Amino acid sequence: MLRFLRSKTVGLSDEELLSQYREQSDMSALGQLYDRYLELIYGVCLKYLKDEAKAQDAVMNIFEELTQKVQKHEIKQFRSWVYVLAKNFCLMQLRKGKKHINVSFEQDFMHSDSLLHPIHEAHQEDEREHHLEQCLAQLTTEQKQCIDLFYYQDKSYKEIAVLKKEEVGKIRSYIQNGRRNLKLCIEKRATRE
């Protein structure tokens, strides 16, 4: 497993390392910070992706994402923030995997394992986006806002609860019900076509 080089950043708090990276673009500070939570991140990736090689790849990709996202987000507690980042990254990978039709063929039999021409894939992707937009519009205001904050703005349940002045359980309920309603709506629209 990957380990980042240690330097003069050893012994600094998470906040100090974060600040050092933001102010000086000190990659060793960010590497040290990431190294502290590497096992946690790997564990999250392994839990969701259920494959050691994919989990290790995800750990590397999450670090690359981190170099940009750390500059854009207000991070109060790095441990919980990076946990949510890793979880969302894995969920996105799983979603990408579900977009493709899984049909097993012998590798020698097919010249290409791509089942659709890229034009058809792009058309299907546009249709899915269209369905998603229409279904999002049908959610309650609370569900829509919570889904937006959680999935599109990378906020945790706790951060959303603070923003909306609600209990975490209520936020979780809005997101779960919103997700279920979206799924049902999208499935219904897809079967009509």
Image (tube, rainbow, N blue to C red):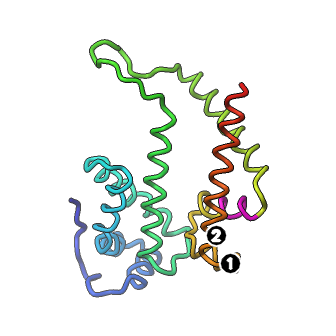
* Mark 1 vs 2, N-terminal side: 1
Residue located 29% across and 70% down the image: 35
Residue 41 image position (x, y, % from top left)? 34, 64
> Is 156 displayed left or right of 37 in the figure?
right
Residues in magenta, as a range: 142-148
Q: Which residue is mark 2?
A: 171
Q: Residues within 10 Å of mark 1 (few under 14, many from 20)?
A: few
Judged from the image, the secondary structure of the residue bearing numbered disc 1 is: loop
Foreground of the two, 68 or 126: 126
Question: What secondary structure do most residues of the magenta stretch adopt?
Answer: helix
> Is 89 displayed left or right of 146 in the figure?
left
Q: Against 44, is 111 above or below?
A: above
Whether tag 1 and tag 2 are in contact, CB under 8 A, the answer is: yes
Q: Which quarter shows the C terminus? A: top right
Q: Amino acid at mark 1?
A: Glu
Q: Which residue is mark 1?
A: 166
